[in-house]
Amino acid sequence: MQEREHTSKQYEQQLRSLKEKLLLIGYKAETSIADATRALVERRPSLAQRVVDEDDEVDRLELEIDDICFEILAREQPVASDLRFITTAMKIVGDIERIGDNGVNIARSALEIMHEPELKPIIDIPVAAAAAQRILKESLDAFVTSDADLAKRVIQDDRYIDDVCEQMLRELLTYMFEDPSTVSRALRLMFVARNLERIGDHAANIAEMVIFLVEGQDVRHRQAAKAKAGD
């Protein structure tokens, strides 16, 4: 049965505002990742502190998005496709907020480590961070445009971030075993790598929700099942 169209101008404006704020909070999270990584690589404490201080903006946008969603649900009568979009947006914004927290964690690690001697050239971290920024943007673009194919590419690309981060962890463990004096610095860099890995995971979560929204296909546990079958 064909869905009825919703003709309320206020309703359409609220949906546009929801999409715009989702892209804005995503941009803020991307910026957090980029600035935190740059602060770490370039040893810029003021930039790292700015990332920490601006986290409140991400939190504020999360609350605004929730308010828009609740208002639409309470005051309007969304058609089925819009209802799915709105409820998915409420889930996605939580992942974005946690990505912002991951960026703050990286910035705080930068503040802790930047005054110590450099353990190793920081090459892999910017690579993983750039990939994480890209798939976060692509996951949100996929959501706003209902592009399941783009969402599937995000999930594939998340594996690349996992591989880079796992390589970093192995290398840092080698430093720790060979020279115990490096343990403190290595652990902080490992924490950074884990946060980048989590950012990729959150972007993949968003992509999985997009696939379910567009195709009705739940892919959340498929990769875990494949990995278990391969053990």
Image: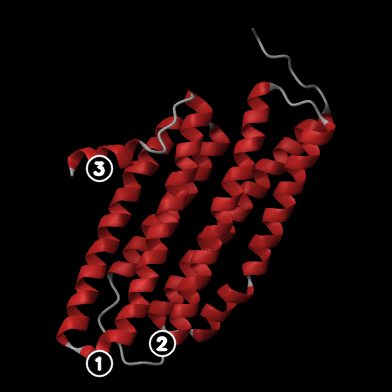
Kind of residue sitting beneath label 1: Ser
Instruction: Look at the picture and state if 212 lies above or below 122.
Output: above
Q: Residue at x 17, y 82 (%)?
A: 177
Residue under label 1: 181
Quadrant in which the N terminus appears: top right
Q: Secondary structure at mark 3?
A: helix
Residue 169, disc: none
Give the alpha-carbon distance from disc 1 to disc 3, as whole Å: 36 Å
- Quarter holding the C terminus is top left
Task: Name which of mark 2 and mark 1 comes first in the sequence.
Answer: 2
Packing grade of label 1 (10 A; few <14, some 14-19, many >=20) is: few
Closer to the observer: label 3 or label 2?
A: 3
Q: Is residue 72 left or right of residue 173?
A: right
Residue pushed farthest left? 178
Label for residue 114? 2
- Mark 1 vs mark 3: give the one in front: 3
Pick whichever, 17 or 172, lies toward us.
172
